[in-house]
Image (cartoon, helix red, strand yellow):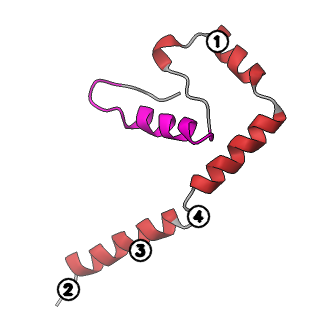
Amino acid sequence: MPLVVKTTSHQLQNALFMEQNGASRCLRQDSLTPERLSAVLASIDRAQLLSMAEAARKLSHSNAASAVADMIESRADRTFRVS
């Protein structure tokens, strides 16, 4: 359930990307009710869940956090180098 506000839609774009690639179901906040959420969750069987998990794994970048940390450290080394 992406949070959609007037100033940004990145959560919706991310959720739709995941759904389009079979990795999730996107439920829009503006049309969500407890009954609809319950129905959607009840409709997802184990095979679908495993399929979504595999699709999400294929979309992931296993070293993303490490790569971001490396970029930050590299930038910090150049920016804050003391002479």
Mark 4 to mark 3 CA distance (whole Å): 14 Å
User: Which residue is found at the position 75% from the left and 27% from the top?
Assistant: 44
Q: Say if the magenta span includes residue 6.
A: yes
- Judge left or right: residue 31 versus residue 39: left
Of mark 1 and mark 4, the one earlier in the sequence is 1
Q: Which comes sooner in the sequence, label 1 or label 2?
A: 1
**Quadrant hosting residue 72:** bottom left
Nearer-N-terminus badge (4/3): 4
Amino acid type, callout 2: Val
Q: Which mark is residue 62?
A: 4
Q: Of label 4 and label 2, which has the lower sequence position?
A: 4
Judge by depth and name the residue closer to the eye, 52 or 36.
Answer: 52
Q: Amino acid at mark 4?
A: Ser
Point out the tag, 2 or 3, that comes first from the N-terminus.
Answer: 3
Q: CA distance from mark 1 to mark 2?
A: 58 Å
Task: Tell me if residue 80 can be seen.
Answer: no
In the rendered structure, the answer to whether residue 63 lies left or right of residue 40 reads left
Cα–Cα gap, marks 4 and 2: 34 Å
Helix, strand or loop status at disc 4: loop
Instruction: Give the labeled residue for mark 1.
Output: 36
The reply to whether the magenta stretch includes residue 22 is yes
Q: Give the residue number, with chain letter if any, for mark 3.
A: 70
Task: Please give the range of residues in magenta.
Answer: 5-23
Disc 1 or disc 3, which is closer to the eye? 1
Q: Which mark is residue 82?
A: 2
Establish if 41 lies above or below 70: above
